[in-house]
Each structure stands twice: as structure tokens, then as C-alpha cells.
Amino acid sequence: MGNIEELTRAYAAALDNADPLAGFRSRFSSPDPELIYLDGNSLGRLPHGISARMQQAVEHEWGADLIRAWNKGWWEAPARIGEMIAPLLGAGPRQVIVSDQTSLNLFKLAAAALKLRPGRSRIITDTLNFPSDLYILQGIADILGGAHEIVRIGSVDGGIAPDLQALAAAIDERTALVTLSHVTFKSGYLYDMRAVTELAHRTGALTLWDLSHSVGVVPIELDACDVDFALGCTYKYLNGGPGSPAFLYVNTRLQPDALSPIWGWWGEAQPFSFELDYQPAPGVRRFLTGTAPVLSMIALEAALAPVVDAGLERIRQKSIALTQYAISLSEARLAPQGFSLGSPRDAERRGSHVSLRHPEGYRINRALIDELKVIPDFREPDNLRLGFAPLYVSFQDVWEGMDRLGRVVQERRFEKYPQQRMLVT
């Protein structure tokens, strides 16, 4: 990248013409052809077919079958959909299940991990982790009476990357659990999962990975890396819809001993025997809690088809190309306007979103959304976050998005917006 030709719309169109995934764009709802949607890392687009599937579930399964629908596929949905997600995680059978929300699954898995490592007092994470993950860890430490110390590793390169030397130094025989986001939510930094997991195991610690910003766009190898626990959401690159249920992974070797701290009836060995004393179900099913949100499950199941059909290798190749193209355009056209890169330059250490930093990032974000039909999002203090979902974002979207971004600053459109943040940024 870098020559004049690559800065033209014609070049972007040529990239689209050569894109083997270009046809997948038509599998997603896009009612406004002028809208450039660069926020699939927060909420994926609606795949076609979801509405019809939901209508069938409501009118026929719920409406006609009523309670009988539980024996026609509803009850098995968490495990069945988990098996669909498992190959996207590099996970073998009977290790992934769909359940609850990401934060609740983190609570269950972290608490289970700590119980498996009695006598160890340290939980290692980093300052780049999603804050909600940190809140859950703090809550667990509080419940356990302060017996565990949470160690947060700092960052380098202006907050783009974790301090890997400090991480290695912090993991020792006192460490019970190392829990990190595979791709960090602000900068998009991609951890070397295998290296960190091996580092933790060397001292006897367990690992728990949050895959929310990597599942569906980055090839993941949970089994090959011998990861202990993992979880993630499904409403970003898996396009499951707002608030769609999350998933969790428990390595087969830990399933006989790992136990959820929340003993719900869906995780009971014989839920319809209605025994008064809890007996955990075998395998990963013991990490289920209450009744599954069936309609959301059904939507998610249908939404997975485009990702499964496209294949992660092709998705990852396009993701790298999209993010690299965005970086090249930003450096050529936006850097003179005060933008700087807030993500790793090395594609091997980058997920599928790019942060551009600017002192007026928040107001620029507002102007893009309200006036120029570009939807990114903003993360404090100055990160304009651009998510590139390879199945429906084109190279021309990238070119046009960068062009409109430059216009916002050049024309000073952002100046009319207040500094006060809206509730959702």
C-alpha cells in the first residue's frame, strides 16, 4: 500500500471485484445503500432469513405446538448450537454450550477455575481487558472474602499492546488463573493464545479466554492450545442479534472436576426428576443454569450459517486485507488532519477492528453518524473504533468511510456537537 493508485475509489472497486467473499454481502439486510456500517464489532448486521425463521418459531412452534415444542428441538438447542460454534473455536465435540450472557459465563468459569486451584491467591489479567470482565473478577474476589489478589498488567505503545514482559513476570506459583481478552476491545490487539496458555500451564495456573472480539473473524485453536476455559458473545461477528445468548467452553479434561457455582435446574443431571438435592449433569451441560431464551437461540442458530459457509480462513484473509487497507488510507489521508493509529500495525497481532485516535474523536463520531451515514463507535478517551466485518463490509465501504471521515474534520462539522457524551457511544 502507499502509492497514488491505491488511494482511489477505482482501486477499491478492483479489490471488491477480486474478493471471493463478495457474494456474502447479499446475505445481510442493508436497507440503506448509502449507509457505511463499521460497527459489526459491536452489533452485527441482520442476516436474511432470520425474520422468517423467527416467524416460524413464534407462529408454529410456540403458537401451535405450545409446550410440545420443548420435545421438538427447543430443549437441545444450547448443546446443538454449541456444536455449531465449536469448529469456529477449534474445539472438539461436547466442550461448547450456549448459555446466559458473557458476564455470567465469566463468573461461572472463573469461580470454577479458582476452586480447582485451592491455595493459590492470584488472578492475572490486564488493563486492556473489557471493564465488565474486570468487574466480574472483582465481584468474585469480594465474595471470596479478599482471599484473591487481582493483578492487572499494564500496557505499552501508548495503550495499544499489553506489557508481555510484565505478564510473564507476574505468572508464578501463586497464580490460580490467567484471564484475558483474546482481542482487546479498544486497540484490537490479538494475543498469542498458545504462548500465554503455555506460560500459565508452566506454573500450574489455569487459563480463561474471552473470545468476544475474535470469534467469527480470527481462527481460534482452543484444543490445540490446550486452553482450559473460554467464553464469548454471539452478537458481534456471529450476527446473533442484540443480547443474543453467549457461549462457553470447558476443556474435556476438566469437565469431571469443574463445577459451576450457580446450580440451576438446566445443569442438573435429571432435571425432570425434580429431586430436592442438586446433582450436576455430566460434561459441559452442568454449566447451564436457568431456562434457555428459546427465541434468541433460534435466531442465533440461523445467523451462524453465513460464517460457517464462508469459512474462517477466508474470513481472516479478508479481515487482514480490510484493516490493512484502512490503515494505509488513514495514514495517507487522515494523519495530516491529526489522526493517529491506535491499533497494532502488525496484522498477526491485530483483530478485525482498527482504532483511529483523535482529540476530537467523540464529536467526530457524532458527526459521522448524524450527518454522513457512517456508523463506527467511540471508546474513551479518544478512540474512533472502526469494525470491519468481512462478510458484508467491502473495500469500497472502507474507501468511502475514510473519505467521509476526512470531510468531517476538513469541513469542521464536528464543532457543532457538544463534548458531553451520550449514554451509548
Image (cartoon, rainbow, N blue to C red):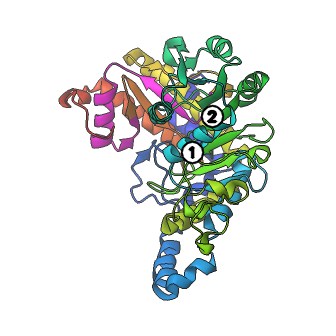
Q: Residue at x 46, y 78 (%)?
A: 58
**From where the camera sits, is residue 311 visible?**
no
State the mark number for residue 240. Answer: none
Q: Where does residue 150 sit, x and y in percent of width and height?
A: 53, 23
Please give the residue where the numbered disc 2 appears in the rendered image: 114
User: Is residue 356 within the magenta segment?
Assistant: yes
Q: Amino acid at mark 2?
A: Leu
The quarter of the rendered structure image containing the C terminus is top left
Please give the residue where the numbered disc 1 appears in the rendered image: 108
Q: Secondary structure at mark 1?
A: helix
10 Å crowding of disc 2: few (<14), some (14-19), many (20+): many
Q: Where does residue 192 sit, x and y in percent of width and height?
A: 70, 27
Q: Nearer the viewer, residue 136 or 191?
A: 136
Q: Where does residue 294 sit, x and y in percent of width and height?
A: 52, 68
Range of residues picked out in magenta: 350-377
Quote the CA–CA distance across marks 1 and 2: 10 Å
Tell me if 69 is positioned left or right of 175 in this view: left
Q: Nearer the viewer, residue 22 or 285?
A: 285
Check whether the beta carbons of the residues at disc 1 and disc 2 lie within 8 A of each other: no
Q: Residue at x 50, y 47 (%)?
A: 104
**From where the camera sits, is residue 230 visible?**
yes
10 Å crowding of disc 1: few (<14), some (14-19), many (20+): many
Q: Nearer the viewer, residue 386 or 231?
A: 231
- Relative to 308, residue 154 above or below: above
Q: Secondary structure at mark 2?
A: helix
The quarter of the rendered structure image containing the N terminus is top right
User: Is residue 399 within the magenta segment?
Assistant: no
